[in-house]
Amino acid sequence: MGRSVDEHVHQVAAVIRGAAQRRAQDPPLECRVVPGLTGRLAAPAVSTLDVPGFDNSQMDGFAVYAADLDRAGDLPVTLPTVAHVVAGDTAPPRLDPGTAAPIMTGAPVPPGADAVVPVERTRPGDFGPVAGGGLVEFSGPVASGTFVRPRGADVRTGEAVLEPGAPLHAAAVGALTVAGVTTVEVVPPLRVAIVATGAELVSGAVPDSNSRALLAHAHELGLAATAHVVEDDPAALEDLLNRLVTDHDVILTTGGVSAGTREVVRQVLEGRPGAWFGHVAVQPGGPQGLARWSDGAREVPVVCLPGNPVSVLVSFELFLRSPLAQAAGRVAWRPSGTAVLTEPLTSPAGRVQVRRGRMEPDGRVSLVGEAGSHLAVSYARADLLVFVPESVTAREAGDTVEWWRIA
């Protein structure tokens, strides 16, 4: 029984989402806030500081009493300057009425001052001596609070910096750090087992690129993952699955899902309740499977991919990357768009063809390699996947195609 690409996307996403929800019920992990922190928050991260920690200037300019400039208009108001206030100053002296403090962006607003006038609104050179003693003219009034960043405007002590479920990306690490948060509780990451099948892989006659590539994808997403190789022996595969189900949340297999005589994954899993094996309307990556494996105490989903290297990589992009990225708190969608094709191509009717491509400097898309599912080197040289709809059998140079960025 066949499926459309959209149908299989939905089915795989559902099983990954279910696995992520079950994993989220496990006790959270306490993690230090450091570069490289990934995943999603399991509990609110509460600020230990006001951010910003003091009223500070939004501009390079002059801290003033707004009332001192009320009469500025046809005639300017001239004020003497005091010592400059720079970022890093911790406790500038109180500003006396009738004076102005030259101040730099991010520097603390002196007590008493309630507004900042940008230096661009004064004459060049009006900053005056660093120690003060200059004069500055103001040509107009200023409202209280102008260009002042109030203490705690971003977050107050005791408030949540980020709520449960928030992704822990680079901006989150920066926000937690500025708020004085040093440790957070993180949802336990999905534990992924990758199983490559084939006697040729066990013997070393063919390098096991599939599990290596999938392992690299898992690590890019910040997921805990292990890689395994098993021969084309049902008993050996069953034994490995029984061991993996105890401490993994999702199992990915490669190979053994087609209609040959030694399709070990299909042999072991096809008859289990709810299992599906069939053809998805895509090239490459047509043979696919979904099943569940239980050791009697625990059950996990098994997502079964074909064995050719390009089929594995395309299958990961189409069916696995988005739900796994969502579970990991990473950006789920690849950048995509449309562009003009530099050369013609043909495509089988009734299947979405996925070709490898490269974005040229002029914004057009060229193809990289042929359509074969074994051309792993050509895939690595590409930076795009190029899509041809199942209703289209040919594209000409100059036609528009859809692309996804993969590198």
Image: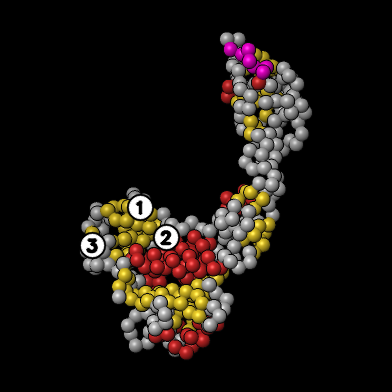
Q: CA distance from mark 2 to mark 3?
A: 24 Å
Say which mark, if any, is on residue 406.
2
Q: Who's the residue at 77% across and 34% down the image?
A: 91
Identify the magenta region.
67-73
Please say if the residues under marks 2 and 1 sit with CB atoms less than 8 Å apart. Answer: no
Q: Judge depth for marks 2 and 3 and give the one in front.
A: 3
> Which quadrant of the figure has residue 262?
bottom left
Question: For the residue marked with disc 2, what is the amino acid?
Answer: Ile
In this rendering, does residue 302 appear at all?
Answer: yes
Q: Residue at x 61, y 13 (%)?
A: 72
Which residue sits furthest top?
74
- The disc labelled 3 sits on which kind of residue? Ser
| Residue under label 3 | 391
Label 3 environment density (alpha carbons within 10 Å; few <14, some 14–19, many ≥20):
few
Counting from the top left corner in percent of width and height, residue 313 is at 41, 69
Of the numbered discs 3 and 1, the one sitting upstream in the chain is 1
The front one of 36 and 16 is 16
How packed is label 1: few (under 14 Cα within 10 Å), some, or many (20 or more)? few
First-in-chain label (2 vs 1): 1
Q: Position of residue 151 (x, y in %)?
A: 68, 36
Q: Which residue is mark 1?
A: 337
